[in-house]
Image (cartoon, rainbow, N blue to C red):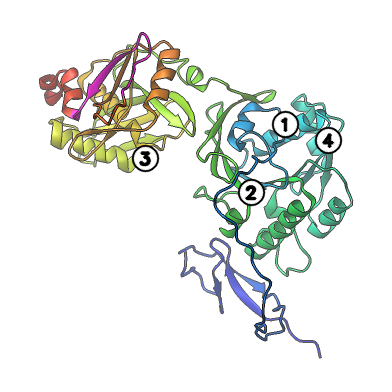
Amino acid sequence: MARRPSVHYVCQSCGAVFPKWAGRCESCGAWNSIVEEAAEPAATGGTAPRRGRGAKVAFVSLAGTAEPPPRIGTRMAELDRVLGGGLVPASVVLVGGDPGIGKSTLLLQAACALAAAGRRVKYISGEEAVDQIRLRARRLGLDAPGLEIAAAINVTDIAGTLESEPDIALVVIDSIQTMWLESVESAPGTVSQVRATAFELIRLAKQRGFSLILVGHVTKEGALAGPRVLEHMVDAVMYFEGDRGHQFRILRAAKNRFGATDEIGVFAMTDQGLVEVPNPSALFLAERRGNIAGSAVFAGIEGTRPVLLEVQALLSPKSGDSAPRRAVVGWDTSRLNMLLAVLEARCGLKLHGMDVHLNIAGGLRVLEPAADLAVAAALVSAATGKPTHAGAVYFGEIGLSGEIRQVAQVDARLKEAQKLGFDAAFLPRRIARGNTRLVAPEGLQLNEIGHLGDLVTLFGGADSEEA
């Protein structure tokens, strides 16, 4: 008599397992995310493995030298920057992003560039037919006869085919949520299938020595769909970000075992696909008008790259008895509320009755606290109606008592500002540390600020208090 397979219930958001179905996951709180799945049989037949003497583990000293891993250049400088210098053989990269943001376009361009350089590249799509991929390549003007494309979702077939192919440099799987393994009794995209198919493909990449890029879907919260263990299994996790209303796209490294994290690559979406932006600062500031109140330039650091961005602030009286509105694009709303409280409590700037709108122009999301001083300058400028100095940049972290705190990589920020023609910088007051001495680039005047009240005074403290 055939034994009925046991089942359990798995949350598709966090991977938690339950003995019975429930409407809400007790682990992550998601609603209607628990799905019935067949339990995988235990490899030991339900008995605990016998403990025996294992092989000896070899330990070595921390001292020693190791050659850096070899790299395969993708012929796309911005992509190579985020990867840490190019693809590493036998490495696995997970690329996530919102639907329609350009993930497939980016990877198809990179695959075509590598194939045109004489590398063996295989592009496997589980979402598009072969003719659809050809049409997209033709629309983008891509010509790489050596690129091999296929439409398949059966991982067993894919693995069997790749094992028989020699000298493969890169395999692209678009996407991991569409892959399916016969031995797992659940639908494609479930936690069990994503975990099992990813493990099989990663094992094959490590064994055969080719680079593997997996495309991943994201949830409405912006996190990668599927089990979190997927992000631990791969060598690098990258997010492709951007606003569809802007032409800019940002490729950001969230994890990289072979390079710097939080490194970014900047692209512009055009009719001919994604175009690299080697100097994003000039592009982000191209449409800036320096004589408008409520605008300030932030000298930021994204990964290892200095980037200048325009911070825009707009204040308007709130309507009726409603609570004041805080609309933020590209920055943290909680941090804006903190700055508004500091400006009012420590500097006497009356903003509690105002609607506040804050925007980071260009569509880039700023994460570092060094943007505090630039945001504060834009807010004070909007409150007083006095424009900031058109040739100045601002950076510095602000504490709850209003003090301006030191930030990292000051030299890189100042050099980027000087390169783009700025003549002044407002930064935290320096604290003597040994023999360290900050040298201003030629033509750049440094204005050190110790307290947020000093910044308000520059715009006219008495007038700002009445605003």
What amino acid is found at the position of numbered circle 3 in the picture? Asp
Q: Earlier in the sequence, mark 4 or mark 2?
A: 4
Helix, strand or loop for disc 3: loop
Q: How far is the residue under mark 4 from the one under mark 3?
A: 42 Å
Task: Give the residue at x 57% y 39%.
Answer: 259
Residue bounds of the magenta highlight: 437-452
Residue 332 — which label? 3
Disc 3 residue crowd, few under 14, some 14–19, many 20+, Cα 10 Å? some
| Mark 4 or mark 2, whichever is nearer to me | 4
Q: Earlier in the sequence, mark 1 or mark 2?
A: 1
As drawn, 344 above or below 21:
above
What amino acid is found at the position of numbered circle 2 in the picture? Gly
Task: Give the residue at x 32% y 11%.
Answer: 291
Helix, strand or loop for disc 1: helix
- Residue of label 1: 109
Q: Are the residues at dot 3 and dot 2 in contact (C-beta closer than 8 Å)?
A: no
- Residue of label 4: 147
- Residue of label 2: 216
Q: Earlier in the sequence, mark 3 or mark 2?
A: 2
State the residue in front, 95 or 87.
87
Q: Point out residue 378 in the picture as x, y percentages from the top left corner.
A: 29, 24
* Quadrant housing residue 115: top right
